[in-house]
Every structure is written in C-alpha cells, then in structure tokens.
C-alpha cells in the first residue's frame, strides 16, 4: 500500500513534486520537438511553427527545474 501524501515528510513531498515538474517540462519540450519535426517533413502544415516550437522546447527545458513559484528550496504541502 502506498503512503498517503499527507503522511510523507515535507522533504519527500518536495522531491516528488520537483521530479513531477521536471518530467512534465521534458514531456512538453519533447512534444514541441515532435511537432516541429512533423511540420518540417510535411506531416503538418508549416505556418512558421518549427522555430517557435523549438524555442518553446528550449525555454521549457531551461526554466523547467526552477519554474516561478517552485524555488529550489522550501516547504511542500500542508498549506
């Protein structure tokens, strides 16, 4: 049986939250890269999107770990 979120220590909650954010950022960036490639190969209509999507992917990867509101330290949960 998995522990209830509220029974996890603040440090564990914070670590899990950070990892979830990191994975979400990588997923979004990966999808942007896939869309850009599809546009370049003609799978989707290119309306100037590949460069914008690659920029989005770079921004998400760069800012993902330190998203606003999620500093590198602090207390998680119990708000």
Image: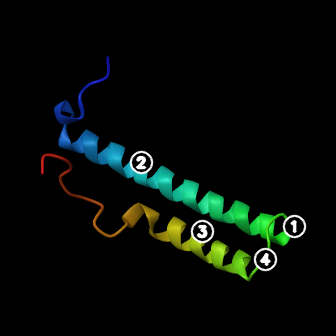
Q: Position of residue 71 (x, y in %)?
A: 28, 64
Left or right of 70 in this view: 53: right
Q: Residue 3 is drawn in which quadrant?
A: top left
**CA–CA distance in space, label 2 to label 3:** 17 Å
Q: Mark 4 and mark 2 in contact (Cβ < 8 Å)?
A: no
Residue 61 placement, left or right of 75: right
Q: Residue 20's mark?
A: 2
Task: Return the residue at label 4.
Answer: 46
- Give the Cα separation between the discs numbered 2 and 4: 32 Å
Q: Which one is earlier in the sequence, the residue at label 2 or at label 3? A: 2
The residue where tag 3 is placed is: 57
Is there CB contact under 8 Å for labels 1 and 4?
no
Is 13 left, or right, of 63 in this rendering? Answer: left
- Proximity of marks 2 and 1: CB atoms separated by less than 8 Å: no
Mark 4 is surrounded, within 10 Å at the Cα level, by few (under 14), some (14 to 19) or many (20 or more) other residues, namely: some
Tell me what residue is drawn at x 17 percent, y 52 percent. 75
Q: Earlier in the sequence, mark 1 or mark 4?
A: 1
Which residue appears at 59% of the width and 68% of the height?
A: 57
Crowd band around label 2 with a 10 angstrom C-alpha radius: few (<14), some (14–19), many (20+): few
SS assignment at label 1: loop
Callout in the foreground (3, 4): 4
Query: What kind of element bears circle 2?
Result: helix
Which residue is more in the foreground, 13 or 32? 32
Residue at 71% in and 64% down? 35
Q: Label 3 vs label 1: CA separation?
A: 18 Å
The residue wearing badge 1 is: 41
């Amino acid at each position: 049986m998995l522990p209830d979120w509220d029974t996890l220590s603040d440090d564990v909650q914070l670590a899990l939250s950070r990892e979830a954010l990191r994975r979400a950022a990588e997923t979004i960036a990966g999808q942007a890269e896939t869309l850009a490639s599809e546009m370049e190969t003609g799978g989707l209509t290119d309306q100037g999107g590949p460069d914008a999507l690659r920029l989005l992917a770079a921004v998400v990867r760069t800012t993902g770990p330190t998203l606003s509101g999620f500093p590198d330290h602090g207390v998680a949960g119990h708000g």
